[in-house]
Image (cartoon, helix red, strand yellow):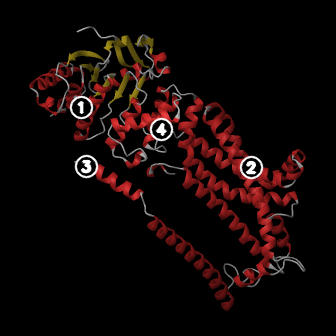
């Protein structure tokens, strides 16, 4: 009886797994529509607040005027205008800067993820190291990044080849923010392997490396990807903050510092830069999400 | 009939667990001939699973020794002399069915074409042809357990250890898989050690049934199953089948004074 039911359920499930192209397209359209609707609602809320607070003169929680909340059209117009006299448009300037920051963030993300995973893998194999090192790893994250950035710049820059001067050090600062969630989650993920699977590998007389590669690593992937999603946005933030003490002008961090000084005159330029920075973070996040979808094949109940 | 060569030899095996000072196994002696199908049966806590694990070198005996094909159990494990099936299928959900069956072959360093060929054979053997590209969670419990059996048999081990492989399945699936297992066993002529707590399953499958009793775990008796082969659905209606089931049940009952009430209920309720 129940076997028949189970078989029927499994047939149904495998039919569902073979989703047609058409229903997939419908799903994608659905999602895109939902995202567009959310964006429109948020923009409407922004302008709605702006309009009502300006009309009534309300000041709580904060007043609305051209400095605190520049109109959307002012911000979008700022993209098209030249950033300075006789210069290309702000949009074009910000795209170049975003690309530069993206390079730093990507290098930092890869560096941090690799280091974080390696650290997690080492700790997963030794309870002693785990107990000894974990407090310092946690401690490393309580130091504000701004406090260590100058040292990193001084230590790292002289060791870099000419082509990596400046941005290479920022990548290391970004990696400092990235490695932590990856290390902690890798440790958890590598230890999450089913003990019965480990026992099965024992019957095959598998080496520690084989077990790591064939059982622990695949078992850890849902955990690792959760961490990579956090790390993806952290790497962008890390790169932007890392640019500040490095005195780099080529990235978004430099632009933010610069536009900060002119905020009272031209707030829309900082707003525009922030939008670009946020979009960069979102692109990083979506890239990891896409990689996860392509790589992780787990039973529905085991997907983290 | 000539005496078959001994595949597994358990001599004087005792296993105590320091925690709670439990004697899981006490002075177990057992020889398995080539091609035998042996069932270990008994109430929970009788050490039947522990004995299987000692044979598989997954648990170290406190004293005594196990030899497999004349080698130590440890050597046999390192040489990958046996395949094992657990109560749960223990399939890797990130691998497809085919890739799961390939796993031990990868460990043995087989090349890809050779692995593919063998996987196709194994899928046919457990009647899952066409399911190779599915992921485990897309299969029913019975199908998953068949994949697990295919994986254990893929490298043709002469010895197959099975720890309550059908315990989590419903009665109808279990009886069907019993028949399948017997036909596989006859094809491959391997030696099987089969842990179960179902009397009828033990009698139906085995050439010998080893009845164990708990606290301390020991062998209460061994019943030779002289049912004619090949066994089929009709075997379960053979009067001799019922006699043997009764004989095993009596052996389990005789030790009843050692059982906790709930265990006795489990023994009595079996096959009711």
Residue in front for this viewpoint, B5 or A101: B5
- The Cα–Cα distance between marks 3 and 1, rounded to whole angstroms, is 31 Å
Give the side of residue A227 with respect to residue B185, left or right. Answer: right
Please report, as a chain letter, where disc 1 is located. Answer: B
Q: Are marks 3 and 1 on the same chain?
A: no
* Discs 4 and 2 carry the same chain letter: yes
Circle nearer the N terminus (4, 2): 2
Label 4 and label 2: CA atoms lie apart by: 31 Å
A144 on left or right of B215: right
Quarter of the image with the N terminus of chain B is top left
As measured in the structure, the alpha-carbon distance from the residue carrying label 1 to the one carrying label 2 is 58 Å
Query: Where residue A38 sits: x, y (%)?
Result: 56, 75
- Residue shown at 25%/27% (left/top)? B260
- Per the model, the C-alpha gap separating discs 4 and 3 is 29 Å
The kind of secondary structure element at disc 4 is loop
Residue at position x 54%, y 42% in the image: A218
The residue where tag 2 is placed is A176
Which residue position holds label 3?
Answer: A4
Q: Quick one: label 3, few (<14), some, or many (20+) residues within 10 Å?
A: few
């Amino acid at each position: 009886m129940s076997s028949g039911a189970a078989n029927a359920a499994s047939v149904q499930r495998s039919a569902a797994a073979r989703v047609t192209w058409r229903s997939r397209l419908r799903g994608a359209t659905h999602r895109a529509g939902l995202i567009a609707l959310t964006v429109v609602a948020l923009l409407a809320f922004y302008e709605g607040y702006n309009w009502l607070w300006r009309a009534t003169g309300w000041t709580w929680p904060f007043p609305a005027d051209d400095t605190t909340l520049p109109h959307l059209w002012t911000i979008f117009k700022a993209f098209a205008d030249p950033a300075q006299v006789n210069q290309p448009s702000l949009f074009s300037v910000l795209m170049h800067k975003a690309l530069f920051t993206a390079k730093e963030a990507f290098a930092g993300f890869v560096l941090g993820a690799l280091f974080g995973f390696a650290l997690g893998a080492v700790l997963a194999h030794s309870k002693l190291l785990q107990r000894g090192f974990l407090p310092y790893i946690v401690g490393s994250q309580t130091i504000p990044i701004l406090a260590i950035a100058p040292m990193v710049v001084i230590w790292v820059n002289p060791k870099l080849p000419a082509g990596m001067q400046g941005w290479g050090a920022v990548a290391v600062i970004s990696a400092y923010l990235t490695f932590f969630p990856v290390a902690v989650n890798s440790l958890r993920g590598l230890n999450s392997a089913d003990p019965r699977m480990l026992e099965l590998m024992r019957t095959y007389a598998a080496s520690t490396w084989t077990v790591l590669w064939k059982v622990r690593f695949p078992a850890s992937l849902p955990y690792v990807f959760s961490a990579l999603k956090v790390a993806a946005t952290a790497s962008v933030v890390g790169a932007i903050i890392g640019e500040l003490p490095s005195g780099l002008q080529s990235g978004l961090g430099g632009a933010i510092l610069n536009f900060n000084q002119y905020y009272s005159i031209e707030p829309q330029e900082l707003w525009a830069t922030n939008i670009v920075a946020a979009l960069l973070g979102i692109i990083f996040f979506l890239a990891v999400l896409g990689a996860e979808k392509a790589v992780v094949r787990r039973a529905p109940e085991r997907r983290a | 009939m000539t005496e078959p060569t001994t595949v597994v030899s358990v001599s004087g095996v005792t296993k105590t667990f320091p925690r709670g000072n439990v004697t899981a196994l006490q002075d177990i002696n057992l020889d398995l001939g080539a091609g035998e199908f042996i069932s270990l049966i008994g109430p929970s806590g009788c050490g039947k699973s522990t004995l299987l694990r000692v044979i598989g070198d997954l648990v170290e005996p406190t004293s005594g020794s196990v030899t497999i094909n004349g080698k130590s159990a440890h050597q046999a494990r390192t040489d990958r002399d046996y395949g094992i099936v657990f109560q749960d299928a223990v399939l890797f959900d990130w691998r497809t069915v085919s890739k799961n069956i390939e796993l031990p072959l990868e460990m043995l360093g087989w090349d890809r074409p050779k692995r593919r060929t063998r996987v196709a054979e194994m899928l046919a053997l457990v009647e899952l042809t066409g399911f190779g590209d599915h992921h485990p969670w897309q299969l029913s419990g019975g199908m998953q357990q068949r994949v697990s059996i295919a994986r254990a048999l893929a490298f043709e081990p002469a010895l197959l250890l099975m720890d309550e492989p059908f315990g989590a399945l419903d009665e109808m699936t279990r009886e069907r898989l019993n028949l399948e297992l017997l036909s596989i066993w006859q094809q491959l002529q391997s030696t099987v050690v089969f842990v179960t707590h179902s009397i009828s399953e033990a009698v139906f499958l085995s050439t010998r049934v080893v009845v164990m009793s708990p606290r301390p775990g020991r062998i209460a008796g061994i019943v030779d199953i002289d049912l004619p082969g090949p066994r089929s659905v009709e075997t379960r209606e053979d009067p001799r089948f019922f006699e043997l089931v009764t004989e095993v049940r009596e052996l389990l009952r005789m030790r009843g004074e050692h059982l906790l009430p709930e265990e006795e209920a489990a023994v009595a309720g079996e096959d009711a």
